[in-house]
Image (cartoon, grey):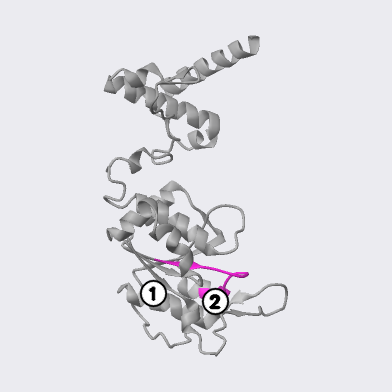
């Protein structure tokens, strides 16, 4: 996957290029990451990248021309741009490009695992990181294919949101995690939260590892993990269960978990 990032602060992305899973994947070129700074496309001596909004009001907007040129340069560099490739043009007509251009915005569609999986199938993405009060509406219409949001809150710019998206996409690239099944076991990958996990030692402050995990019986472990995953989702994110069509095994295991949980809670209250 080749990702182009349009940002005023490319240095921020060292957090993903130098560390952890994303850092290793980028160094191994499983993911390619490049940056385009709108400031490099300015023509005035102050390299101005913000401007006042028409109609007045507080705040500034990202300056239209440098931002558009940066987006189009990113498209062209990824060798997937089509249609109008004249980077000096002020024409705001959207070109027919195969690279999907994403704007990280609080007004966008909320990012969920299903959306990440959909985006991970793209070979090339351009991520536009807004700053100030946002970008000109005409740029949204002309250059942006999709808007995505981390949630119903506002942060200072799109860089942090882009880094989250890059991290999530990288996890789904072949070989990025080492174990090919690792991403498939993540929370939300099957619509459920992950089951509880345990490591050594077997006993911590009188709390022991569940016996099923020590049994060596793969089918018993599978059933235990599925049951706990269903139960964890029921306790913490019941809204997710409402979206699922549980099969017979899942319904039975969830009912068992709920009954056992309620019995345990009743016993604790009696004490």
Instruction: State the residue lying farthest toward the right.
Output: 57
Q: Which quadrant, please, contains the N terminus?
A: bottom left
Q: Earlier in the sequence, mark 2 or mark 1?
A: 1
Direction from residue 59 to residue 142 in the image, left or right: left
Would you say residue 96 is visible in this rendering? no
Direction from residue 113 to residue 216 in the image, left or right: left
Point 53% across, 63% down: residue: 158
Residue 198: x, y in percent? 41, 28
Q: Which quadrant, please, contains the C terminus?
A: top right
Asked whether residue 103 is drawn in magenta, I would say no
Q: Nearer the viewer, residue 180 or 106?
A: 180
Give the Cα separation between the discs numbered 2 and 1. 19 Å
Q: Residues within 10 Å of mark 1 (few under 14, many from 20)?
A: many
State whether residue 13 is above or below residue 93: above
Q: Which mark is residue 138?
A: 2
Q: Residues within 10 Å of mark 2 (few under 14, many from 20)?
A: few
Point 42% across, 30% down: residue: 195
Q: Which residue is mark 1?
A: 74
2 or 1: mark nearer the eye: 1
Task: Label 2: state its secondary structure.
Answer: helix
State whether residue 59 is above or below residue 173: below
State whether residue 122 is above or below residue 235: below
Task: Label 1: state its secondary structure.
Answer: helix
Residue 265: x, y in percent? 58, 16
Q: Are marks 2 and 1 in contact (CB under 8 Å)?
A: no
Report which quarter residue 191 is drawn in.
Answer: top left
Residue 238: x, y in percent? 53, 33
State whether residue 21 is above or below residue 214: below
Question: Where are the magenta residues, as a range?
Answer: 126-139
Asked whether residue 135 is drawn in magenta, I would say yes
């Amino acid at each position: 996957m080749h990702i182009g990032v349009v940002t005023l602060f490319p240095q921020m992305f060292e957090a993903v290029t130098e560390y952890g899973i994303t850092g290793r994947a980028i160094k191994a070129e499983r993911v390619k990451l490049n940056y385009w700074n709108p400031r490099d496309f300015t023509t005035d001596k102050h390299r101005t990248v913000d401007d006042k909004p028409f109609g007045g009001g507080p705040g500034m907007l990202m300056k239209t021309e440098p931002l558009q040129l940066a987006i189009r340069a990113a498209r062209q560099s990824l060798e997937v741009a089509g249609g109008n490739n004249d980077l000096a043009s002020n024409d705001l007509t959207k070109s027919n490009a195969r690279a999907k251009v994403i704007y990280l915005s609080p007004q966008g569609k909320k990012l969920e695992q299903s959306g990440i999986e959909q985006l991970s199938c793209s070979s090339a993405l351009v991520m536009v990181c807004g700053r100030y009060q946002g970008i000109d509406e005409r740029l949204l219409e002309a250059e942006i294919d999709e808007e995505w949001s981390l949630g119903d809150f506002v942060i200072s710019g799109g860089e942090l949101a882009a880094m989250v998206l890059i991290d999530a996409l990288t996890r789904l690239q072949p070989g990025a995690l080492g174990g090919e099944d690792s991403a498939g076991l993540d929370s939300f990958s099957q619509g459920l939260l992950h089951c509880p996990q345990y490591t050594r030692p077997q006993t911590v402050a009188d709390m022991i590892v569940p016996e099923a995990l020590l049994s060596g019986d793969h089918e018993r472990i599978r059933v235990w993990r599925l049951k706990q995953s269903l139960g964890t989702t029921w306790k913490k994110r019941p809204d997710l269960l409402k979206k699922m069509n549980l099969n017979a095994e899942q319904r039975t295991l969830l009912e068992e978990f709920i009954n056992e949980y309620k019995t345990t809670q009743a016993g604790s209250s009696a004490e």
